[in-house]
Amino acid sequence: MSILERALRLGEAKQFKAYSKRVERINDWEAELELLEDDELKEQFAELRARVQEEGLSLDDALPEAFALTREVGRRRMSMRPVSGVAGLARLTPRG
């Protein structure tokens, strides 16, 4: 394996580790959100939107809650739990 190939793999490993940490933060919301009624989930979305728009919460800070809320709604509406938070995070990451 060339030095370039090893460096690229190292970069991918670092990125995957960063994604994994973010997925853990998303998963931390799961137990709490499962207990909410559908109307309460809508209210939580509205509160999150307000914190971003009115209070200046950064999108990075809002991301775990937003992904967790979306996943919970998907689980309820489609009777399936999307498991690949890493894929969703990768779609948000700009590639150079």
Image: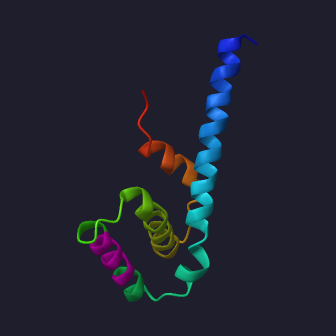
Q: Which residues are magenta?
A: 43-51
Q: Looking at the figure, which quarter contains the N terminus?
A: top right
The question of residue 50 being in magenta is answered with yes
Residue at 24 percent across and 67 percent down: it is: 53
Residue 45, image x, y percentages: 36, 75
In the rendered image, the vertical position of residue 79 relative to residue 64, given as above or below: below
Depth check: 65 or 88 in front?
A: 65
Q: Looking at the figure, which quarter contains the C terminus?
A: top left
Q: Quadrant of residue 79?
A: bottom right
- The mark tally for this picture is 0
Depth check: 84 or 76 in front?
A: 84
Residue 67, image x, y percentages: 47, 63
Q: Quadrant of residue 83?
A: bottom right
User: As drawn, which residue projects farthest toward the top?
Assistant: 2
Residue at 56 percent across and 60 percent down: it is: 82
Residue 58, image x, y percentages: 36, 60
The question of residue 46 being in magenta is answered with yes
Residue at 35 percent across and 73 percent down: it is: 48
Q: Is residue 81 visible?
A: no
Main SS category, magenta section: helix
User: As drawn, which residue projects farthest toward the right?
Assistant: 1
Q: Is residue 53 visible?
A: yes
In the rendered image, the vertical position of residue 11 relative to residue 77, given as above or below: above
Residue 85, image x, y percentages: 55, 55
